[in-house]
Image (cartoon, rainbow, N blue to C red):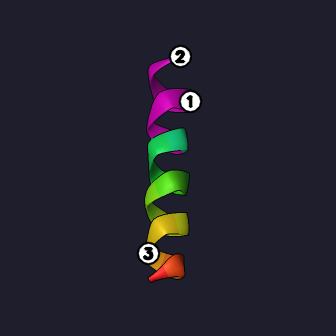
Amino acid sequence: MFRQRNLNMLMHDIRQSHQQ
């Protein structure tokens, strides 16, 4: 559960970084 949440946050961060 905790690891999955971390992965989701990381994916979101990467997507936002890519958009910029």
Q: Are marks 2 and 1 in contact (CB under 8 Å)?
A: yes
Q: CA distance from mark 1 to mark 3?
A: 20 Å
- Residue beneath disc 2: 1
Quarter of the rendering occupied by the C terminus: bottom left
The residue segment tinted magenta is 1-7
Residue beneath disc 1: 4
Q: CA distance from mark 2 to mark 1?
A: 5 Å
Query: Residue sitting at 47 percent across and 67 percent down?
Result: 16
Of the two numbered discs 2 and 3 on the same chain, state the one appearing first in sequence.
2
- Quick one: SS at disc 3? helix
Gap in angstroms between the C-alphas marked 2 and 3: 24 Å
Q: Residues within 10 Å of mark 2 (few under 14, many from 20)?
A: few
Nearest the viewer among 9 and 1 is 9
* Residue 4, quarter of picture: top right
Residue linked to disc 3:
17
* Mark 1 / mark 3, whichever is N-terminal: 1
Look at discs 1 and 3 and give the one toward the viewer: 3
Residue 2, magenta (yes or no): yes
Residue at x 44% of width, y 37% of height: 6
Which kind of residue does numbered mark 2 sit on? Answer: Met
